[in-house]
Image (cartoon, rainbow, N blue to C red):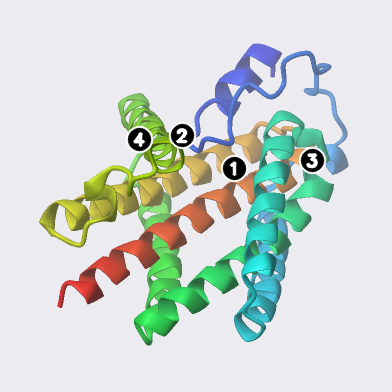
Amino acid sequence: MSKHQALDTFGRSGNPVFGDKFEGDAQFRDLPVSEKMTLDGTVNKTGILLVLCFATAAISWNIPNPILMFTGMGIGAILALVTIFRPTMAATTAPIYAASQGLFLGGITVFFEAQFPGIAIQAIGLTFGTLASLLVCYKTGIIKPTENFRLMIVSATAGIALLYLVNIGMMVFGGGSGIGFIHSNGLMGIGFSLFVVGIAALNLVLDFDFIEQGSENGLPKHMEWFGAFSLMVTLVWLYLEILRLLAKLRSNN
């Protein structure tokens, strides 16, 4: 397998953490089997990250503290950038990322739960239900990550990211509430959240495809941690968007 083929495989995911991470790396087609990425290894590492995330989320849930929550968010953002640009460090950064995101998610979930009792279990259930459903759809071929499908999800994901950046800029520098329909609980606001949830969910399909193709093509072992990290990024995004959508629906009743 050539470097060009590896780069092509690596670029198949629409997840924003994926990109051309092998530029300048040595050829890896002759790596020993023990040093190659496997599907089982990635699944196991994803499980480790989920356990860490839930463990720290439980701490933040039981000891709600804004400082703890925002510290976790800040550390998570920094480690996400480090991992994106240095995937070889994923074995170290991904577990810390998952733990810090757990602190953030636990804290923000307490905030939503105080306003809308029962929303936490609904959001968790829908997130993992979506994960399981899309995995089945992917494995059975109901949803196929064709090139057009990838292009659509990548474009939509980039558009959403840009819109959120503009919204943050308006809130910080304009002193206002940002782009109205992003936060609205009206029909447009709910429709927007449904769209974002759908795009976040479909990113999972592209992640599944990358992990499967990467395992079949024998990418380096550290990509197991990077693949698990990418799934965590998507799941965190999906959970937050589902939480926002449920809050809009509940507040609209």
Please name the amino acid that badge 2 sits on: Gly
How far apart are labels 3 and 1 at the CA level? 12 Å
Query: Which mark is first along the chain, 1 or 3?
Result: 1
Which numbered tag is attached to residue 14? 2
Please name the amino acid that badge 4 sits on: Leu
**So how many labels did they put on this image?**
4
Horizontal side of residue 111 vs 144, given as left or right: right
Please name the amino acid that badge 1 sits on: Ile
Of circles 2 and 1, the one toward us is: 2
What quarter of the picture does the C terminus occupy? bottom left
Query: Which mark is first along the chain, 4 or 2?
Result: 2
Give SS at disc 1: helix
User: Mark 1 sits on what residue?
Assistant: 211
Specify whether residue 162 is in view: yes
Which numbered tag is attached to residue 168? none
User: Mark 4 sits on what residue?
Assistant: 163
Of circles 3 and 1, the one toward us is: 3
What quarter of the picture does the N terminus occupy? top right
Give SS at disc 3: helix
Looking at the rendering, which quadrant does residue 121 occupy? bottom left
Query: Crowding at label 3, few (<14), some or many (≥20) Cα neighbours within 10 Å?
Result: some
